Amino acid sequence: MGRIRGDLRVLGIANLLQALSLNKAEGFLTLWQDPQRKVIQMGPAGMRLVTAGGRRTHPLGEIMIRTGKITHAQLEDILEEQRRSGSRLGEVVAHRGILSPADIENALKEQISEEIYDLFTWSEAAFEFVEAPGAPLPADGGPLSEVTLDANVMSVMLEAARRADELSRIQTQIPDLRLIPERQLDQFVPLDDPELDKAALEAILPLLDGERSVERIIQDSLFPKFAVLRVLYELVQRGAIKLKDRKSGSTLRRVLSPATPRPPAQGRTLLLLSDLPNFRTALSVCIRSAGYEVIEGHNSSDLKDLLGRSPADAIILDVSVETDNGVSLCTRLRQTTRIPFIVLSGNTSRQAVLNAAQSGARYVLIKPIKEDLLLERISNVLKG
């Protein structure tokens, strides 16, 4: 493969990552979207984020602050000990008993995932991939580069697609990151609102000074971009903030594009039902890549028509199994057809899983969906 260069406007980040993964490429992928630059090392064990290219000078420290493990003053004390001892920040944190080595690794993996998901909002970036099998990490790699993220690119794409659908909803209220949120003092925002991330809300409220743009709030917050946008969206919905100085153009875009699917397997057809367009597209790519034919539907009203036009060997339902509508759809399927079905749900509660299972689902998979588990469950269903 050597060296390849291009533009994400032409190829798309989803297609690029999948192409590198399918070719088992090893080397360094650099992406630029002025003024940001990210470098990912791809290898057989997974992906490493060599350079995040953002404002995160001490990502582990910021994670500990936003999760309430330490204060800003304690971080400065820890950094001073790090400078004196020459140890890594993670070693000092583990030695003090603030986080275990496993907790540190999980926290950094979460941060790496957020940085990679953020790439799916980059639409005008340039990229370069340089093949370098077995290359060591650069000496100046940051703390994030010390952790390897799973190399399952399709699983990353599935979660990115789910977020893209949510971002498209957020965009209806926040179409431009240059807009300035202005608090409406007559609107009280309860910190115990279940729809709001309490920790993120407490961190973001002081930043709503009527001067900072959405983009600046993202930069000044310790929270990931996606988490900040979700909170701001909910505040707009509640009338707690209004956006001023609207300008033309939008910096928040959906950029997920499907890769070219493999030829379908002989006689194995799955019906995929989801009202989330990007998530549905990514699921379809994932299933087709395993050799199945896929028929896509938008909602439950499509189901009867689709089944009448083309028989399916199995059905994948992305439904809300904690609602009466979701449960009744599963029950109706069990009563009217012998086609086995798998439910995908965003609800992790035990009752939601029981609802789906009792309504006839062969399997219930909780989001974010892992590619290998999804394909394994599909294979099991088709075996009978």
Image: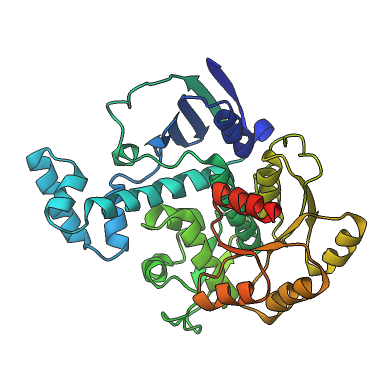
Q: Position of residue 173 (x, y in %)?
A: 63, 65
Which residue is situated farthest in the right direction here? 309
Whether residue 251 appears in this view of the structure is: no
Q: Give me the residue at 30% from left, 54% from top.
A: 62
Q: Quadrant of residue 9?
A: top right
Q: Quadrant of residue 324?
A: bottom right
Q: Who is closer to the viewer here, 32 or 246?
A: 32
Q: Is residue 381 above or below residue 203?
A: above
**How many callouts does the rendering have?**
0
Which residue is situated farthest in the left direction here? 84
Q: Give me the residue at 44% from left, 55% from top.
A: 218
Q: Give me the residue at 61% from left, 63% from top.
A: 363
Which residue is situated farthest in the top direction here? 2
Whether residue 370 appears in this view of the structure is: yes
Q: Position of residue 95 (x, y in %)?
A: 12, 51
Quick one: quadrant of the N terminus? top right
Q: Is residue 61 above or below residue 46?
A: below
Classify residue 311 as left or right of residue 23.
right
Q: Who is closer to the viewer here, 199 or 133?
A: 133
Classify residue 286 as left or right of residue 101.
right
Q: Is residue 372 above or below residue 33?
A: below
Q: Give me the residue at 63% from left, 76% from top.
A: 358
